[in-house]
Amino acid sequence: MVTVADASPTVSTEDRRTPAPAILIATLGTVGVVVSLMQTLVIPLIPSLPGLLHTSASNASWVITATLLAGAVATPISGRLGDMFGKRRILFSNLVLLVLGSVVCAASSSLVLEIIGRSLQGAAVGAIALGISIMRDELPPERVGSAMAIMSATLGVGGAIGLPVAAAIAQHADWHVLFWTSAALGVVCAVLVFVFVPESPVRTPARFDFGGAVGLSIALLALLVAISKGADWGWISTRILVLFAVSLVVFLAWGAFELRQRSPLVDLRVSARPRVLFTNMASIAVGFALYGMSLTFPQLLMAPKETGYGFGLSMITAGLALAPTGFVMMLLSPVSARISAIRGPKVTLALGAIVIATGYLCAVVMMNSVWQIILASVIVAGGVGLAYAAMPALIMGAVPITETAAANGLNSLMRSIGTSTSAAVMGVVLAHMTTTLGGHALPSREGFHMTFLIAMVAALVGIALTACIPMRKAPDAATTQGYA
């Protein structure tokens, strides 16, 4: 059992600098975009991966799954390490892992090495939660709201712009160039962080909770592998059922263990506060709704015209058609911050979920032209931008300043669980509701309709969960950094 003699917060004077707020926001925003770019980096390679890696399609899928799993496990751990040892230090370490993973992938064509490299890339996802916490520590209160909104929006921006960029590189150059490019971007971000980002003055001295980290890793790995591979292995297969059982048992044991720690990896007592709990539950629902757009809209745009509903676009053209979604998220981030400052982040989160549901409703009734799909995607993206920007404000208004990185890491984990669950559910729907064209099974019009309806229901669930979030009548401005 790991114990801590004194976990009271301290203020460090190490490497103190006061960069201009605009420079700090631009630096951390760039890091967020590059880190989130890793999620869509290999999507253009999906059809070719088995041949490129000389393996089966099922095995090749681990190149994508590994990034998701590593990110889910590393995000809360990175947040806790940031609270303990310095957020800038751990942020820089995350970028080093991204560069190392990119080089491993770029220098090899082996399945095992590609999985290792992609896992290292995924471990860098914790940089977004760390960036949000650094902004809270370093920026003046009047700048925190909009800055956090921008940083939170980068999660969608990187994924949106990454698809057409990665497709263009993959189509016109050797596939390894994708990873050399990501390595170069990682180096640039690491230099920017080293030069422009100060170390946080807020520390929580403690011994790292290795037992909690191991337990959470095992439970999350079992859960997310079961979710991501359920469609391939069969939802009632022995392997999937065992993984779900292991995840449940380990989560229960991990929770009991964490409650006995004086400095736990995740403070479950804080996480159980209604404001934190319902925000995290709403994050799962919004993350689920987000991935409905990421997975289904590209497939619909690229479906052959002969189906009667597809548009026959290439990967690059489809990516460009959906690229505006990322810019909409970024443009709406200051709007989200303004709404949160006036009406409170709870209202912003609810509004975002309403907009998401409206976007999917448009997708259901408007599937007859490319511009209609683009319109629906932009509406959904606008809702995601509003919702994602409000989540950190809700979380940080309810946790001590010494736990902001860990709390944001846990919230990012909830979004990851939502997106990975959505990937599994949407994949099953599109795989079973099919039409045949030229001897090949393709997702049917009804299948796409069903995915849009499921995503819309998830957004409605997010609205209901948001309504349950309690808000203080007279919040402490110093704690909420300008949010009511």
Image: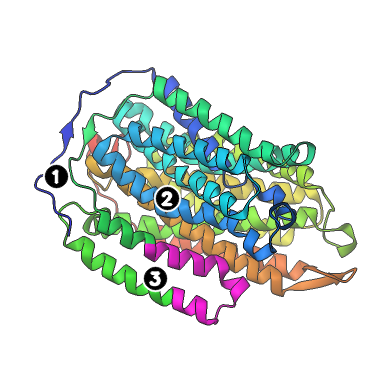
Instruction: Give me the disc on residue 412.
Output: 2
> Whole-Å distance between the Cαs marked 2 and 3?
19 Å
The correct choice, above or below, for 187 with respect to 149 in the image is above
The amino acid at mark 2 is: Ser
Q: How many angstroms separate mark 3 from mark 1 (CA)?
A: 30 Å
Residue at screen point 21% across, 36% down: 203
Residue range of the region highlighted in magenta in the rendering: 218-243
Q: Image quadrant for the N terminus?
A: bottom left
User: Residue at label 1?
Assistant: 7
Q: Is residue 208 visible?
A: yes
In terms of secondary structure, where does tag 3 sit? Answer: helix
Nearest to the observer: residue 477 or residue 165 = 165
Mark 3 or 1, nearer chain start: 1
Q: Position of residue 429 (x, y in %)?
A: 66, 71
Identify the secondary structure beneath mark 1: loop
| Residue mark closest to the camera, 1 vs 2 | 1
Q: N-terminal of the two: label 2 or label 3?
A: 3
- Identify which residue, 267 or 232, lies in the foreground: 232
Viewer can see residue 357: no
